[in-house]
């Protein structure tokens, strides 16, 4: 495992792409993902 220095190049996290930033702030996309996750939860709960 390589040694990481505190301010070395590998220390900083990756920066989100412009597309990722747009999707995170798009309310329609957030609503769609919210509905998808809720449907998955409901399906899981109904199995028990």
Image (cartoon, rainbow, N blue to C red):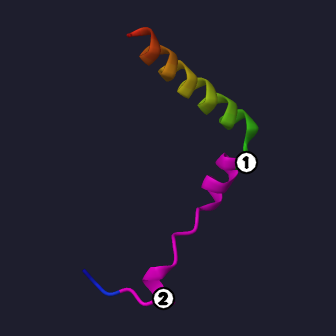
Mark drawn on residue 38: none
**SS under mark 1:** helix
Q: CA distance from mark 1 to mark 2?
A: 31 Å
Mark drawn on residue 25: 1
Number of marks in the image?
A: 2
Answer with mark 1 or mark 2, whichever residue precedes in sequence.
Answer: 2
Residue 39 on image: x %, y %: 53, 19
Query: Looking at the image, is 21 positioned above or below residue 31?
Result: below
Task: Give whichever of 44, 33 is nearer the camera.
Answer: 44
Query: Looking at the image, is 43 positioned above or below residue 37?
Result: above
Task: Give whichever of 26, 7 is nearer the camera.
Answer: 7
Residue 44 on image: x %, y %: 42, 18
Task: Name the residue: 51% across, 72% down.
Answer: 13
Report the side of 12 relative to 27 (left or right).
left
Density class for disc 1 (Cα within 10 Å; few <14, some 14-19, many ≥20) is: few
Task: Name the residue: 69% across, 51% down.
Answer: 22
**SS under mark 2:** loop
Q: Which residue is mark 2?
A: 6
The quarter of the image holding the C terminus is: top left
Query: Looking at the image, is 29 positioned above or below residue 2?
Result: above
Residue 17 on image: x %, y %: 59, 62
Stretch in magenta: 4-24
Residue 36 on image: x %, y %: 55, 25
């Amino acid at each position: 495992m390589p040694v990481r220095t505190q301010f070395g190049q590998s220390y900083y996290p990756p920066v989100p792409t412009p597309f990722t930033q747009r999707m995170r702030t798009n309310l329609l996309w957030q609503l769609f993902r919210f509905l998808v996750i809720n449907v998955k939860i409901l399906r899981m709960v109904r199995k028990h």
